[in-house]
Image (cartoon, rainbow, N blue to C red):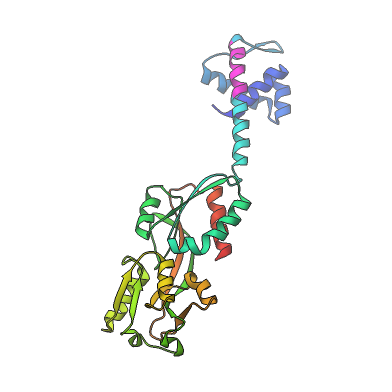
Amino acid sequence: MEIRNVISFIKVAELNSFSKAAAELGYTQSNVTTQIKQLENELNTILFDRIGRSVSLTSAGKTFMKYALQITAAVTNARQELSYSAIPSGELRVGLLESLCITYLPQIIKSYHKKYPLVNTIIKIGTYGELATMLNSNTIDLLWTFDTHINSDLWIKELEYANPICVIAPKSHSLCNKHTLHLSDLSSETFIFTESSCSYRHTFEELLLSKKLPFHTFMEIGNTEIIKKFVASGICLSILPQFSITNELQAQLLHPLNIIDFQLDMYGQVFYHKNKCVTPAMKAFIDLVKEYI
């Protein structure tokens, strides 16, 4: 049932005239006649008595009128509500790594909530593997990770940006006095690492092994804040993304070592599932992340 046919029906009944209804709606009279005929065929009834030049509703037409008014009212309400939905609202579920959450999210969420107070934001913290499962099961709307280049046939990549991986030492460490270093200079050092599934840790360890350079792992822990505190205390060295140590570098608590034969970039990436309907809340969040990066 076409809504334009229902609208024409209401207008003919209101004006008791096919020609007047056609003129007001911007149709030809034959168009309106055809529309009413289509409606009558669909409903399997006669909606108008046509006696001479007089047009009036039949009993069936009067019965249908109340439904016709409900139909047009429902369409009008739907259009209004959908136009309002262009304003970000509802629920937004974002999954991301802990380091990204700590570094970026406080300011982003502060700005996002100020601009879009109708959005209820739910944050999920996890490893890349955990977040990937969440995205594929529609448990989260957006995935924000930091890794090697990721390409998936199931996902749409909305954003990608590079950030260097740094070998960090406490400010008091003797290596901080050297302008240039090689990986071999680290062979006697003790390291605290993120979890074994971390891509930049894996790349660093593989590089050391390929050069047959020994290294000692003091501790493995997923929390980058704890790693930074251990390094700053002078116990060990570590490797972390530059974005995660900005405050410590400014406060001169940590020092990035200039390792000539270790230059590595990893990539921040934001994804949503290809079958996901992108909501205004999702788009607004993506746009805001792009502003902050």
Which image quarter: residue 6?
top right
Question: Foreground: 188 or 166?
Answer: 188
Q: Is residue 159 visible?
A: no
Question: Foreground: 165 or 54?
Answer: 165
Image-based side of 57 in relation to 129, left or right? right
Q: What range is drawn magenta here?
A: 60-70
Magenta includes 8? Answer: no
Which image quarter: residue 10?
top right
Horizontal and vertical percent position of residue 290: 55, 62
- Whether 223 is drawn above or below 54: the answer is below
Horizontal and vertical percent position of residue 187: 31, 84
Question: Foreground: 202 or 161?
Answer: 202
Residue at the (72%, 19%) spot, across then down? 15
Tell me the chief SS of the magenta region: helix
- Whether 45 is drawn above or below 88: the answer is above
Quarter holding the C terminus is: bottom right
Horizontal and vertical percent position of residue 63: 59, 13
Quarter holding the N terminus is: top right
Which image quarter: residue 59?
top right
Horizontal and vertical percent position of residue 205: 31, 76
- Whether 206 is drawn above or below 198: the answer is below
Magenta includes 65? Answer: yes
Q: Is residue 15 visible?
A: yes
Residue at the (61%, 49%) spot, across then down? 116
Question: Foreground: 107 or 233?
Answer: 233
Residue at the (62%, 41%) spot, across then down? 84
